[in-house]
Amino acid sequence: MSPAPAVAALDWGTTRLRAWLLDGAGKVLAERRGDDGLITAREKGFAKVLEGHLAALGAPQTLPVIICGMAGSRQGWIEAPYVTVPAPIGAILRGAARVEGSSRDIRIVPGLAQRLADAPDVMRGEETQLAGAGLPAKGRHLVCMPGTHSKWVAVGDGAVEGFGTWPTGELYSVLSAHSILKHSLGEHPAPVAADSPFFAQWCQRALGEGGDITSKLFAIRAAGLLQHLQADDAAACLSGLLIGGEIASARRRYGASEAPVALIASGALATLYGAALDLAGLAFRTVDADEAVRAGLVEAARENGMIGDAQ
Amino acid sequence: MSPAPAVAALDWGTTRLRAWLLDGAGKVLAERRGDDGLITAREKGFAKVLEGHLAALGAPQTLPVIICGMAGSRQGWIEAPYVTVPAPIGAILRGAARVEGSSRDIRIVPGLAQRLADAPDVMRGEETQLAGAGLPAKGRHLVCMPGTHSKWVAVGDGAVEGFGTWPTGELYSVLSAHSILKHSLGEHPAPVAADSPFFAQWCQRALGEGGDITSKLFAIRAAGLLQHLQADDAAACLSGLLIGGEIASARRRYGASEAPVALIASGALATLYGAALDLAGLAFRTVDADEAVRAGLVEAARENGMIGDAQ
């Protein structure tokens, strides 16, 4: 007989959804992925989409559900209002908003807002990864969560002090598809290898420029004309330039942290950022992004009394 | 009776063409504009397109023709090979390539190549504006030519020492059309006013960051969510951020010049860059871009013996 789940946990983003049944220690008992993110769920109905996935997972009728991500935005199921930083991570999780009108206990973790006049910023979903990253309760820690909109978070003694967004993944897609660089990268550039010498070289160049990447974008095009740079290598140049620029910029903003940077990422992205952090001379430890979001969701369920304390 | 033209001058770019009949002092006697840039001319034939415009202008059969721009690229009429910098401006102009097989004397001004391993760059067309900017023969001068791909050129004692490209105009269009910022700017943002307080504020922010703009792009989106930033103001933020970032980056690369920056631009762009240079505390003088390219073409015709010395 399989063990009974303690909670259903969902990472519910704009275009996709991941759902797990977890036991009280956060162990995965069952898993599903779907394309019915916020955009689809707005049409079909959030409750219906959720119950469909829960039924397929074999979840009991009374199992509580904890959710993070864009489902809690104003365009989502219900708005889980932003928690303003600075704020302790525990308090953020306890701000989960309850979905009314269901027989289940369904709650959505709030996003974070940085209400600084000259550096306004928001996140939704990454706060849960952060909570599940296993950061020590004491000391100052820097967290890097790479992606379409990479987030860097400064954490002090278990509280989010501040954060910033670098749209590195989005810049890579938009520039390779819509700028003059599309002629350099070609239509279908191969995935960038972290051991590409072009990745390393352009990452180093960006690291030496404090986050200024605009002065070097056109140089990728010119290198194609003057130095016979090939399409796949051009993709590695762009990737190295953008990731190196992000790290240089974040380091300039937050300074060096004594503890290793917590790099919350998976797969190829984790490898690329790891290589870039090495080039920057920044110590880091990698936390798998999937494991972090699940651990954060379990922690949120616990902070809200939906499951018992850890054994 | 109208005075006889001394030369036909063409600025022949990728998507458009401008043609003038000029007297020996560079005075405009007749002018035409066309959409038959390189792309169209490759189909119709460059000679045919040229003769059509010359006939419409009433140019005599033997009038010499001086051309600058992408018509001289490898994809153009004939390739006018890049001149490698550093190079004296006079020598660049004298490198004009002759189009064979015509009864006319037709020459195309070469572009410039910067063959540095870590900063490869090219320009084609802007070298002619530069030659027509009326720079003093002595001293160090910094030249800013804003546009889709803005060029900054360091000139010393009449020679191009080096240059760089900032794709500021392209970043503005690509980000406003294809990134998450399209939600902030709306479908048809109004033209940015140089006296917008949002333009000034975000330009100042960029100037303080040494050319790092990627850390502030998402803040425009967040300002819409947290500070009720309106669409037209968001466009001013993006414009100020990108132009301020370009100036900060170019200043970091080339240092301050003792002489005022020569800003070769026209219309709204000249006003925006003028406002940004003021915010940066950089003295400048504006040179009209149309006048500069015509003066440069006349100078090129003279350097190649196509017209007599200036009276």
Image: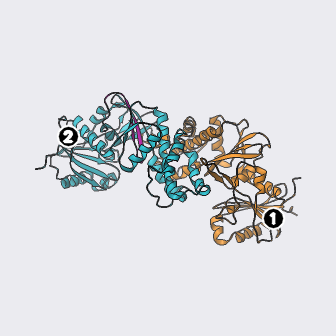
Chain colours: A cyan, B orange
Q: Position of residue A266 (x, y in %)?
A: 35, 47
Q: Amino acid at mark 2?
A: Ala
Q: Quadrant of the image for the N terminus of chain B?
A: bottom right
From this view, report whether residue A34 is shown above or below residue B46.
above
In the image: residue A92, left or right of residue B305 = left
From this view, report whether residue B83 is shown above or below residue A87.
below
Identity of the residue drawn at 27% across and 38% down: A96
Q: Position of residue A180 (x, y in %)?
A: 56, 56
Assess disc 2: are there few (<14), some (14-19) or many (≥20) residues with their C-alpha within 10 Å of its C-alpha.
some
Q: Quadrant of residue B40?
A: bottom right
Q: Position of residue B112 (x, y in %)?
A: 69, 53
The residue that mark 2 highlights is A25
Q: Amino acid at mark 1?
A: Pro
Using the rendered image of the protein, determine whether residue B9 is visible from the camera's viewpoint.
yes
Q: Position of residue A246 (x, y in %)?
A: 47, 42
Q: Which mark is residue B87?
A: none
In the image: residue B230, left or right of residue A141 = right
Q: Chain of mark 2?
A: A
The residue that mark 1 highlights is B64
In the image: residue A297, left or right of residue B104 = left
Asked which secondary structure carries label 1, the reply is loop
**In the image, which is nearer the foreground, mark 2 or mark 1?**
2
Using the rendered image of the protein, determine whether residue B145 is visible from the camera's viewpoint.
no
Q: Chain of mark 1?
A: B
From this view, report whether residue A4 is shown above or below residue A255.
below
Identity of the residue drawn at 10% across and 50% down: A1
Assess disc 1: are there few (<14), some (14-19) or many (≥20) residues with their C-alpha within 10 Å of its C-alpha.
many
Magenta region: A135-153
Asked if residue A219 is among those painted magenta in the image, a careful observer would answer no
- The reply to the same-chain question for discs 2 and 1 is no
